[in-house]
Amino acid sequence: MPTPAERSSASRLNVHIGYSRAVLAYLRQQGVNPAGLYPAELLQRVEQADTGTTFPLHDFHAVIDAAQAHLRDPDLPMKAAECAQTWDAGVLGFALMTSPSISEVGNLLVRFQRLLTTVYEVQASQDEHRFELRLLPAAAGVQSPALARMLMGAWAWRVRWLTGQAALRFDASFEGPPPPDAAAYERCFGGCVRFDQPVTAMQGPAHYLALRVCLHDPRANGVLCAQAAVEMERLEGDAAGLLVVLRRRLRERLGSGSLTLDALAADLDMAPRTLQVRLEERGLTFRALLDGVRDRKAKQYLAEPHLNLTEIALALGFANQSAFQHAFKRWTGLSPGQWRKQQARC
């Protein structure tokens, strides 16, 4: 549990309401009525908030700490993680549900993690054998072991649910000492679980990244990812600010052959490293920003039947039609031709 000093410094750190709701759902599974455990005002805020709402970190702890104390269960965060429903994460949750693959689910978690919590950042890596998702504190000196363990557990359960494959196994590592009984952790991850580690992370076989998401919907996913990007801008107080300017400049540069971070930074009289940091602060990379601009413009061009794919590829700044087709399929799960035919049937 964070100390008072940590809570003071964490005044701007938030946690998505879905994690507090998962705690309440777990309490009900255990036969506990939350109304007898929490002040009416707190309970009302949790249960009646919109799905996009975030809670201050100290309010999340008011929920989970009281539940742990009542049940006398130090493993409650890991057990409650199973009750975290994907759709309770609002627009990001639905974006995850309609993604093409687990690889893209991981990309969205990295890109939009701040919609779930500003307490931690997500770092993804992989090699030919393994992938890894790490949780890194977003602010020096502020951590929440309960939240970290709940986030990690929710990831494991969500991947199984999204793919429809209940037997998937993961390894996990956690900072801090082991619990008296690690059974809840072993049940959640299914693989090797280690404690007193330098980082909190989840690992799995690299081939899991290619697993298809059962509810994949290319059209819905594109819309939902765009909505998530708008929510990220709103979170950063930047709905009419930097990202709007960057997207406009990129649209102006499409087809010019100068679609690089350095060129964009020069347009803004900004050092490339400064621009990179500004993007990272908003959960973006230059490639993700450029992909978003190209994706939207590509769909506009594809709606014009007189434009052929080579013309569209060059207008978007691709070297050739093949590069455009590969990128478009990565964005939508469909080839440009398939997408165009699908739109023609609508």
Image: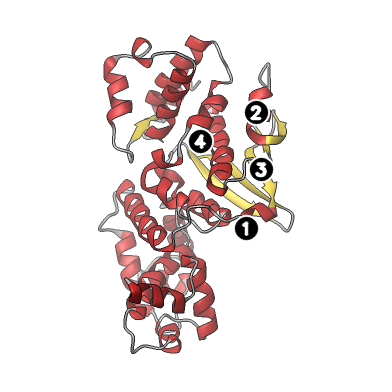
Label 1: state its secondary structure.
helix
Relative horizontal placement of residue 57, taking residue 325 as reference (left or right): left
Please give the residue where the numbered disc 3 appears in the rendered image.
168
Residue at left offset 49%, top offset 11%: 69
Q: Position of residue 30 (x, y in %)?
A: 49, 16
Residue at left offset 49%, top offset 75%: 335
| Residue at mark 2 to residue at mark 3: CA–CA distance | 14 Å
Query: Tag 3: residue type?
Result: Leu
Please give the residue where the numbered disc 4 appears in the rendered image.
140
Quarter of the figure with residue 157: top right
Label 4: state its secondary structure.
loop
| Residue at mark 2 to residue at mark 4: CA–CA distance | 27 Å
Q: Position of residue 200 (x, y in %)?
A: 62, 36
Query: Tag 4: residue type?
Result: Ala
How busy is the neighbourhood of tag 1: few (under 14 within 10 Å), some, or many (20 plus)? few
| Residue at mark 4 to residue at mark 1: CA–CA distance | 35 Å
**Sequence-first disc among 4 and 1:** 4
Residue 289 visible at all: yes
Label 3: state its secondary structure.
loop
Please give the residue where the numbered disc 1 appears in the rendered image.
210
How busy is the neighbourhood of tag 4: few (under 14 within 10 Å), some, or many (20 plus)? few
Query: Tag 1: residue type?
Result: Ala
| Residue at mark 2 to residue at mark 1: CA–CA distance | 25 Å
Q: Nearer the viewer, mark 4 or mark 1?
A: 1
**Sequence-first disc among 2 and 1:** 2
Please give the residue where the numbered disc 2 appears in the rendered image.
185
Q: Nearer the viewer, mark 2 or mark 1?
A: 1
**Sequence-first disc among 2 and 4:** 4
Q: Is residue 115 above or below residue 141?
A: below
Label 2: state its secondary structure.
helix
**Sequence-first disc among 4 and 3:** 4
